[in-house]
Each structure stands twice: as structure tokens, then as C-alpha cells.
Image: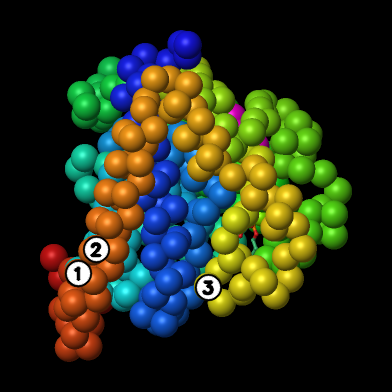
Amino acid sequence: MSKIKNYKEILKNGFTKLCTAKAMTEVFEANFKVVSKYVHATSRGHEAIQIALGMQLLPQDYVFPYYRDDAMLLAMGMTPYDLMLQVLAKKEDPFSGGRTYYSHPSLKDDDKPKIPHQSSATGMQTIPATGLAMGMQYKELVDSKSNSNTFNASDEPRPITVCSLGDASVTEGEIAEAFQMAGLKQLPILYLVQDNEWDISATAQETRAQNAYEYAKGFKGLEAISIDGTNFEESYETLQKVIHTIRTERRPILVHAKVPLLNHHTSGVRMEWYRDDLEQSRLRDPYPKMKQLLLENDFSANEIKIIEKTTLSSVQQDLIKAQNAKDPDPKDLFTHDFAPTPITEEKGERTP
Ligand SMILES: Cc1ncc(C[n+]2csc(CCOP(=O)(O)OP(=O)(O)O)c2C)c(N)n1
Ligand SMILES: [Mg+2]
């Protein structure tokens, strides 16, 4: 039996999120023409590690997900309907009012981790994320010197920053700059690298000399851990320890999670065009593994079936509802909440 507290509840919640994310991939695929107004990617194959992380974050944390992190967003409390409003570019899309593409979230809900706006250039979240962790450290330093507390009481336990990355983006130069600074300044940041060994259609063998775990070992002050990101229990337990360490010891840790990519790179780059490893990759699918984990923890086959059925039918209904939701009105472009306040001509300052 696992040492994780409330393990059965966590397993049920985690499996429900996994089935929901998987259902979204399947429903999007079955409704390809409706959903592909523009490009989208899904987490299929990466769900276990993403959910294990998303479930353990707090509203005071700052998260920089990347475009494949829809299961992480569900685990943080977003609904499939919320995400569909973005994929269909609808007016009520909670991230950007239908103006940025799928899984490019930005969020400031009181009850959820905060998400700064995302770039579509891979890896570009890493320097801002590391800078944000530096800001957290600075705030704590100011507090300790002035004996004041600029954090809210609800900021206990201490917040962390999370930067989520695909394996190929880690080969970019900017990531080295960020790792240097995180290690040097001992910043409270978790780098999660989801290693599916693909860089669009180029393989790991073609694009890198080492994986992110081996690479991180070269940065003094940055601890690195490598795990099987398809194993929910290992992922949850490792992240529980890692998050606790960052909250209390205020230092950076990189978690390298090995995962298979089981859906297209994106809706525009189809797996059937170039993947010759799919049969092999499907043997590592986190979904049957998690199902087995539930059975081993006294869930009945019938309970599992009910979760599978209800998540699939609710995702199907959500897509119909989202299709019928309002489109953005071009007239709102300059009056929408997201638009900057106009600059006054006299002073060159922004009006309040
Ligand atoms: C700076 C930059 N270079 C290239 C691209 C094109 N591109 C988009 S996704 C991608 C592959 C990224 O692979 P990885 O980071 O491993 O994430 P995965 O899609 O495998 O989850 C590339 C090269 C981009 N968006 N931005
Ligand atoms: Mg990859």
C-alpha cells in the first residue's frame, strides 16, 4: 500500500482526470473538422505525470505550462469546457477571449495556480519563469529585512514556480541561461521536462547528445531526478517530495519524466506521416497502467467503467455546448478586458 495520504481519493481523482484528457483527445479526433479551426496539441501519453503535478499545486504557485499540458490544466481545476472554448476560439475562453491558441493559457483565478501568458516559441517560458522565481526570492529577502510580510497569510506554505518543458526545447540556448541562474541563485523553481524523445518529427538520436537529466547534472546547484512519467504512483510521490523540498528549502529541482507521445505532434503534424514507433510506444500507455493501479487498490471493474463512460459522455456534451457558445465580436477588440488602456496624448501616460 502506498505511503501517500488519502491515496484512494487521489487515485480516483487522478484517474478521472486521465480519462477526461484521453476522452478529449478522442473526441477532438472524431470531430477533427469542427475542432481544427487552427492547430492544437493534446497530452495523450503524458497524462500521468501532468496530472500528478497539477493536482499538487496551490493557488499561490506560478505555473508556465507548454502547449501539450492540457491534462495538467484539468488537474489544476480547469474544465474540458473551458479548454474547448479556447480550441474553438470562443468569446468566453477564460484565457484570452478566443485570441490565443489551444493550451496557451493565462490565468489569474483566486482558487487556482497563476499562469502568466504563453509564447508559441518553444522553451521561451523558461527565462520568464526563472525570473519569476527570482522575484519570489527577492520578495522573501525584502520581507526578512524589513520584518514585514508582503505575502498574504494564504501564501503559506511558500509558493513555488513551475516551468514545464518538452525534451527538445531543453536543447535551446536560453534554457542553459535559466539553469545557470537557478543553480547560482538557488531559486524556488521546479523544471518539469516531459521527454517523449520527439522534436516534431526529428528523433532524440538526431537532435541531442544527452537527455535533460544528464544535461542538468552539469549545472551546479540544480538537483535532477529522472522518473517514469507513465507511472502515476511514482510521479505523484516524487513530485510530492520535490514540491515539499522547494517550498521549504528554496532551491531548484529538475524532474525528467520519460513518457510516450501517443497522439499527433499537433493536429497539423499527423503521427501517421512519420511515426514508426507507435506500436512500441503504446506499450507504455499510462491509461491501462493506471487502470491496473486502481484494480490493485480495491476499485471494482464496474467503478472504473463508470468513470470511463461518464467522462466520455460529458466531454462529448461539452463539445456540443462549446460549439454553440458565442464567437468573439471584432467590435470588442478594443473594449475587451484584455485590451491595454489607451495612452493619453497630453502626458503620454496610460489612463487609469
Ligand atoms: C523557438 C522555436 N523553435 C522551433 C519551433 C517549432 N516547434 C514547435 S514544437 C517543436 C518541437 C518541440 O519538441 P519538445 O519540446 O520535445 O515538445 P513535444 O512537442 O515533443 O512535447 C518545434 C521544434 C518553435 N515553436 N519555437
Ligand atoms: Mg518532445
Q: Which residue is mark 3?
A: 267
Q: Which residue is mark 2?
A: 318
Circle 1/circle 2 CB separation < 8 Å: yes
Looking at the rendered structure, the kind of residue marked 2 is Asp
Looking at the rendered structure, the kind of residue marked 3 is Ser
Circle 3/circle 2 CB separation < 8 Å: no
Q: Residue at x 39, y 75 (%)?
A: 31
Give the distance between the C-alpha atoms of the residues marked 3 and 1, in whole angstroms. 22 Å
Examine the image and state in which quarter residue 329 appears. bottom left
Residue 102: x and y in percent read 41, 66
Q: Which residue is mark 1?
A: 321
Q: Secondary structure at mark 1?
A: helix
Quadrant of ligand 1 in image: bottom right
Q: Is mark 2 within 8 Å of ligand 1?
A: no
Looking at the picture, tell me which residue is in the foreground, 130 or 265.
265
Residue 274: x and y in percent read 73, 71
Q: Residue at x 21, y 81 (%)?
A: 327
Q: Secondary structure at mark 3?
A: loop
Magenta segment includes 255: yes
Q: Which residues are magenta?
A: 252-256
Give the distance between the C-alpha atoms of the residues marked 3 and 2, in whole angstroms. 20 Å
